[in-house]
Amino acid sequence: MTGTRRVRVSSPQTRIALARGVRGVRRPLPLPGPADPALARRVFVAQRRAAVRTVALLALVLFGTSGLIAALPVLDRLTVGGVPLSWLVLATATYPLLLLIAAWHVRAAERTEDRLRPPSAPTGDGPGRPARDGRR
Amino acid sequence: MTIGALREARLLGTDLRAGLRAGGAPAARRIRRLLRADAVLLADLDGPVARHGTLPAGSDTDALLAEVYEHGTALRRPPLCAAPLIVAGDLSGCLVAAGDLGEEDLGEVARLVAEHLDHAGLRTARVRIAAADLRTLRAQISPHFLHNALAVIAAHIRSDPARARGLLTDFADYLRYSFSTQGDYATVAEELQATQTYLELQRARFDDRLDITVRMAPEILPVAVPFLVVQPIVENAVRHGLERKAGRGHISVSGVGEGPFVVIEVEDDGVGMDPALARAVLAGGGPPARGVGLANVDQRLRAVYGPEHGLLIETAPDSGTKVIIRVPRFMRGVVAE
Amino acid sequence: MTGLLAIGFLIAASLAIGVYGVRAARTTPDFLVASRRVGGGWNAMAIAGEYVSAASVLGLAGLLLKDGIGTMWYAVGFTAGYVAVAALVAGPMRRSGAFTVPDFAEYRLASTGVRRLCGLVVLVIMWLYLVPQFKGAGVVLQLVSGTPYWVGVVLAGLVVSGSIAMGGMRSATYVQAFHYLVKLAFIAVPAVFLVVRAGAETRARALEPVTVPDGWSRPLLDIGDAGYPLLSTWSVLLATTLGAVGLPHVVMRFHTSASARAARRVAVMVIALLGVFYLFPVVYGLFGRVLTPHLVHQGATDTVAVVLPGEVAPGTLGGLLTALVAAGAFAAFLSTSSGLLLALAGGLSHDLFGSGLSRLRLAVAAGAFVAVLLSLPAAHVDINVMVGWAFAVAASTFCPLLVLGIWWPRLTLPGAVCGLVVGGVSATGAALASVAGTYASGLLTVLLAQPAAWTVPLAFATMVGVSLRWGSPPEGATRAVLRLHAP
């Protein structure tokens, strides 16, 4: 590039706003609601039920395992392959349970979404605009 | 005393900000104080909505309201008086007061309340108008480009039918995106896709004298931005930067996240422009042939995000041009459906 | 020396990946923007990479050596947090379009003023979380190069703010994902080596329950030996699980997902990644008790993971393994702190001071400076304990805000504000009181050292109570909530 040095320009409004350096008050934009409120409410209720169930299960696993270890000191003395049972429960057994609960929740939530999808809405994740995959 | 009354009148407006139903109760209390009345009742066409103080026993407000609504004028039925609320020429409610007060005073307050209700209506309309404004500002597809695109496809049909078919698909995708009516916003990924198809068509026109680089941080691809803000800038770079330049031209489109902001830059190594002209274009002046797209994008960005998020242009004659969009990642109401 | 080399190599690799992450893509007919969206797996690794902090790499092993096997409840809670994230916030947050928690507050409460309060809370949580990270970096640098602690902390501050300035704020996903792999490899390889090399006798001794110190082998957390093991454990579980929901820098990562569904799935993947990772710190803790018990008396238990390989295999091999762990710990520091610093800087410049355009770099520098200052006197506070406080504050402020904001349309602005203030003040106050003094009552000790057991319910109750009593939900609240769940 051989020309002169570039100069930065903007609209007068932008120039003044930038010089002030503080965000001004913005006009509120309308917040779009769901296309079908009645259907959206049904989805909401179903998802809330699933969420409550999952949180209850999570509490059961966390407080249940720790409560069990607290209530049954005998678990410390039982060993499996030389490792105290209570240690095994704590260090390894909880993670698969947590994964299972989460996976189960996601499946339930996605099924609800598929079941209660507005008929006009596109299926799958993508937005409704054209995808270019596999056109050539 | 006068200042106090003005203050009360202004606060009455604050009470009625969201309309009679939402703000009736505090408004009735304020009106009662203002008129020094024993009781005040506000009604809309469906009946009373708010009351302050106790109305005299045995007063038949329903009959009084019906009478006011029938005649559309103020009435005096001691100990009550009533005045209609005429909002923007339409009868829309009634103010009833009990006590020893002049008909003139009541009428004045009723007109004040009506005025405030009118303002409240306008205030809600303003949000709708802003949205409608945005929609009218929505970028228009340029006839210049339509013509060129079809011409270049026609030129390829015999020499390279496969390429022509590809270009036609690009063209169809581009049209479908620009005519898409869902929402006023799109994701950065969708914007890039549209820009991409546009550039494909332009490359064919330039006999591949056009080099394009796209550098995008993947994090910003799902961010919602106003519909068609990137493509018009690229179109401006092609039409006013590269078309007049001899030899190869280069355009780079890049996007990164910077904390809570998204920065998208379109840079070309074309002929550049006089900064004064760029300033005039953004200020809304300038020759009509130049930078209509840029001014439109700038206006829409400012309308959506506020004045500090307008376009920034870095340019000089023979130095190419860089256009910078810098907007927050999140803005309430900006959602790509 | 090897350690310093390994750390230097790590920093160079991170910068290289940061550049590669926004690599130039020439236009070709096959260029597809859509395919360049961050895949779920990468995003999950990036989240895990940012989340697995010095607390996990160094702190868990250290605290385990000091306080006993019950420390692993921290790890369980850190992981369980993502079950709550998947179930409660990931999908709806993505649909709201909010990038940060203050964004969400504005979305749901239709008020720009609430941003400022949220920005303040972001600052508190992020600083509480940054201090242990800087401490970890200082300790590691001290160990591998022999420099004083404060030099390490200052150096760490310079490195992290420098790496952010050099483009770290632009595209972090692949860097963070790389850091997860580094951390996993660098903690797993030496751990496996330890197990194999230590010999049958040491292995058996490591697994043998001990009676001294009392309760060490009991898999419950008895904070301060106060005699309330179950209450302590539950309080830690509440803090870590619900804290993960409200951590500002974690929430931001879900914005990268292409859709709400993808965000939810990513959260599940994170659980698997964390579960694998947390199998290893326990090895260092158990072997540390057998091989390096002197660290407990020196008050240097946070160094156990770095010291241990040298104990087992003196010489070059040990040096190499030490370097590996040190680099892993430094990766933990680098990725977590840069995520934290960026979130902090955003909160400082964007939300708290409302400066429209970037004072971001300045805010990064200021945030790092304060964090370094706070870290200097923190040399002897356990990493994991401080992290526990950060989680407790997040669990008592942003967790109720997000959960109620997403699932309860009746939440009002006064309710949210009161809940944030009450939760933030009580949780921070309890942590400060816990550092400031010692208390005769065991119950009080526990409830101050890990306050989540009472501050979380208190914050939820305040938000619900105030919302029901004062104010009405902001205009369009029901619409705003329903939109978060509409497919």
Image (tube, coloured by chain):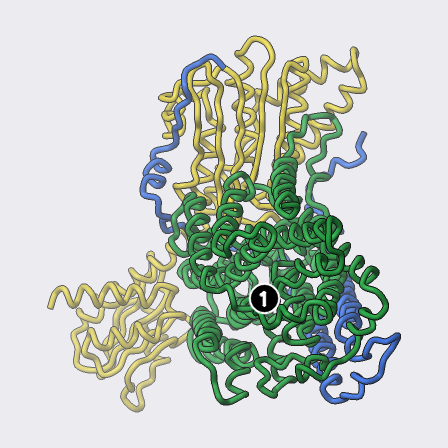
Q: Residue C285: horizontal and vertical position, in percent?
A: 70, 68
Mark 1, residues whose alpha carbon is within 10 Å: few (<14), some, or many (≥20)?
Answer: some
Q: Which chain is green?
A: C
Q: Residue C179: horizontal and vertical position, in percent?
A: 67, 49
Front residue of B309 and B146: B309
Query: In the figure, what tint was chain A given?
Result: blue
Q: Secondary structure at mark 1?
A: loop
Name the image quarter holding the N terminus of chain B: bottom left
Front residue of C310 and B183: C310
The part of the image, by quadrant, that contains residue A89 is bottom right
Front residue of C199 and C94: C199
Q: Could you tell me the amino acid type at mark 1?
A: Ala
Q: Residue furthest right?
A: A81
At x 44%, y 46%, the residue is: C360
Above or below, B142 relative to C305: above
At x 38%, y 77%, the residue is: B48
Left-right relation of A135 to C146: right
Query: In the figure, what tint was chain B given?
Result: yellow
Q: Is residue C472 visible?
A: no
At x 80%, y 59%, the residue is: C192
Q: Is residue B13 visible?
A: yes
Give the chain letter at badge 1. Answer: C
Left-right relation of C167 to B29: right
Judging by the rendered image, the residue that carries numbered circle 1 is C300
**Count of number-bearing discs:** 1
Q: Residue C375: horizontal and vertical position, in percent?
A: 47, 60
Q: Residue C230: horizontal and vertical position, in percent?
A: 65, 84
Front residue of C127 and A96: C127
Q: Residue furthest top?
A: B246
The part of the image, by quadrant, that contains residue C277 is bottom right
Q: Residue furthest front?
A: C315
Above or below, B312 relative to B125: above
